[in-house]
Amino acid sequence: MIPAISTAAIYSTLGSTQSLIPIFVKDTLNSIGLTTGSYITGKKLEAKDRFIDEFGTQALWLLGIPVYKWAFENTVFKAMDYDPKFDVRNFKNKKVLEQIQKFAAKDNSEFQAVIKKAIANEKILKNLTYTRFGFSTAAAIITYLGLTAFRQKDTEKCAKKEILAERAKRLQKHTYFGAENSENKTESLPEDKKPNSHPAFTGKHEAFEAFMFNPVRNLMILDGAITTSRFGKSRNRQDVIGYTVKEGSCWLFLYLLVGKIRDALEKRTFDKHNKLITLDSTVIESKEFKKILESNDLENHIKNFKEIAEKSDDVIYEYIYNNRGNSVVKVAEMSGSTSSHHNIIPLTKDNKIDTRKYIDINEVKGICKKLEKVKENFQNSGEPIDVFLNQLRKHKRASIIANLAICVAAIGVIAPAIMVALRFADKNNKNFQVKEDLAKELDLVAA
């Protein structure tokens, strides 16, 4: 049996909109589907071209930005003796920043010096953070462009070799039967002559921060560059049609519709089964949540937090720090994506609030509203706590799996099937166009 904490981590990660793991799962199956489709239509050569394009891009897409960030942090940040984990969004509210400094000192935290230096060098640290974001994104894009150039040149080289081998085989066959055996023109390209009948193979501040600090949104920027590059470097109409289907389906089911599908599935669960599953899986799966729901203090905890939530952010921050026994604060500490370390209230390894990191007060307020509704859902159900929680867990898991299955089916099965169908529907578009174009160019040069 899988321990509850492991189950919680799995479902929390798969259901998170800020985790890269579900993106990886969906895109891997999409890449497998597209590579299979390319083999059906264009055999080994097109499948190889697609494989390099899809899986090579995926490696850069998912690992490029984190690797380049890590490199920047371990060179530039380290050389300048700044902690890259200090979140510059803490500078947005000076009163909150005062609370952060106060509590770091109160805990005798190891982060006191980090926070003190950050406050004294706000401009430098902001510039470093923004430069890290710009560098890692730009470096990943440049690496992708290099991969694309390599792939297209490699495909052209392999296609040329394949064409000449096929023609040599046919010529050998004709010669054997006494056909053309003299004055055959050499079908090759001069080293100094290149094909030229087709392109060479070759918000605002807060909105900006929302992309910079969210791993999935960060990935969207790189994906936007990849999509633009793919269309810009399309070798023919076949590429354009294929990328339209592929990129369109991926943008819809990796980014744009994921939250809407989740919300629709959660609403359907409530309408059909009267179970509110909006809280994070880490919370729903935990033993602590049972104690929270059973507690006679839960109503007062929610009431107390709601009263504080009407006040300024620095007062709310102080309340969170001093009232970690409050049920709302406990649930907020448990909520978030463990895979991307995006907890609503970030904690250190020794279970203290990590004062270097940013607490989004609005997210904590949102947790309060969700917890209050789940409390009412439990009270109105009339079910024993164990029955209620088992049903809640079952429906939460089913919702996450359904969301993943819908997206996987769309980009891993339906999109590749559409691409194959479009190829077979047009007799002039069935074969691998890169190879077809190169064969024509070889004929022109040989003539």
Image (tube, rainbow, N blue to C red):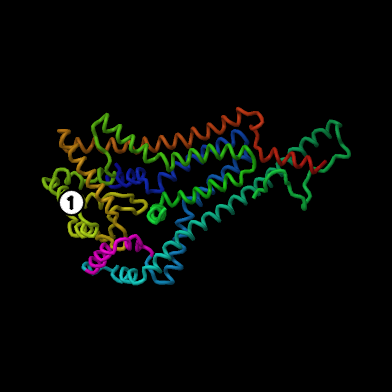
Segment colored magenta? 84-105
Few, some or many C-alpha atoms within 10 Å of disc 1 (few <14, some 14-19, many ≥20)? many
Q: Residue placed farthest to the left in the image?
A: 296
Examine the image and state in which quarter residue 109 appears.
bottom left
Residue 428 on the magenta segment: no
Residue 56, position as x, y percentages in the image: 54, 49
In what element is the residue under mark 1?
Answer: helix
Quarter of the rendering occupied by the N terminus: top left
Q: At 79% across and 50% down in the image, what residue appears?
A: 190
Relative to 18, is 441 on the left or the right?
Answer: right
Most distant residue in the front direction? 204
Q: In which quarter of the image is residue 280?
A: top left
Q: In this view, does 397 lie to the left or right of 185?
A: left
Residue 19 in the image: above or below residue 253: below
Measured from the top left, where is residue 420 in percent x and y? 57, 32
Q: Which amino acid does label 1 sit on?
A: Phe
Q: Where is residue 302 in the image (x, y as percent from the top left)?
A: 17, 47
Q: Where is residue 194 in the image (x, y as percent from the top left)?
A: 74, 49
Front residue of 21 and 18: 18
Q: Name the residue under label 1.
A: 305
Residue 197 placement, left or right of 102: right
Which of 84/257 is in front? 257
- The stretch drawn in magenta includes residue 103: yes
Measuring 68% from the left and 40% from the top, which residue is drawn there?
435
Residue positioned 51% across, 41% down in the render: 247
**Majority secondary structure in the magenta region:** helix
Q: In which quarter of the image is the C terminus?
A: top right
Location of residue 173 by image quarter: top right
How many numbered marks appear? 1
